[in-house]
Amino acid sequence: MHRSARTRRATLTPWPVRSWARDHEINHSRKENHNAQLIESTLVSLDGVIEAPERWANFDAEATALSIKELGNYDAFVMGRVTYEKFYANWGHIAGNPYIDLISAMPKYVASRSLTETAWNATLLGPDPSSAIARLKDQPGRDLIKYGTSRFDDTLVRDQLIDEFQFWIMPVVASSGQRLFEDVDTSGLDLRLTDERRLENGSVILTYAPG
């Protein structure tokens, strides 16, 4: 997970549904000796905005297909409370959309100091989310995915828990909203470019690894 000065609402093009459970079974043996990594994937406008990408991110058929395919690389989501509540409100009661159906089926691990219960296949990480995530990463299997840079990144970056950053740069100026790495201490974060992919809609996916 991606134009003219006039923005358009993001749409999800219908795509054949793949079974998350089936993919998990097929791919698990291939990566049974691979400890999970935490991958963060963020939609970013040309002016660095990450807030409310549903207002400005243009997903064509290629970008939608890639987003669905990428979900097959992951065993579970990691997210903070704000992201969990937003995603659950927007997607938790939708069925029949291939992309959302895959997300709904996946386990989700949520960092929160205020929530006492969850729904939508979600589990609270507990009072020490960094230790909980470190334990999840120690388990063999596919990687963990976190959508969007957030204040939770201040903890994740500090504790060096994010193994890869994927920035989906969208060819649009959003003008206002929360910026990439806002409220996150990145003074100790050094990134090196490991991959670049260009899509037909003009967006570019840049992949970086710390160190």
Image: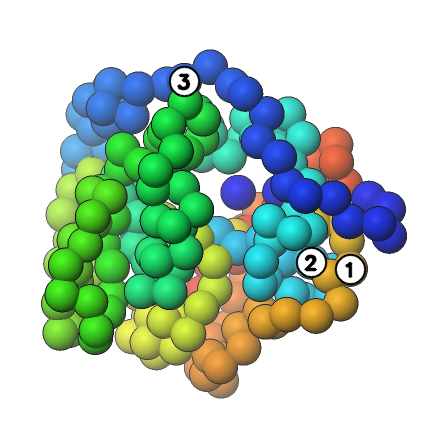
Quadrant of image for the C terminus = bottom left
Q: SS for tag 3?
A: loop
Residue that appears at 44% across and 68% down: 150
Task: Answer whether labels 1 and 3 touch (C-beta < 8 Å).
Answer: no
In contact (CB < 8 Å): disc 2 and disc 1: yes
For badge 2, the amino acid type reads Ser
Q: Nearer the viewer, residue 136 or 64?
A: 64
SS for dot 1:
loop
Q: Earlier in the sequence, mark 1 or mark 3?
A: 3
Report which residue position mark 1 lands on.
173
Left or right, residue 4 beside residue 38: right
Place of residue 65 in the rendered image (x, y in percent of width and height, measured from the top left): 55, 26
Across and down, in percent, residue 138 comes to: 15, 53
Circle 2 packing at 10 Å, graded few (<14), some (14-19), many (20+), is many
- Tell me the crowding category of disc 1: few under 14, some 14 to 19, or many 20 or more residues within 10 angstroms, Cα based: some
Q: Residue shown at 76%/67% (left/top)?
A: 175
Q: Position of residue 193 (x, y in %)?
A: 58, 56
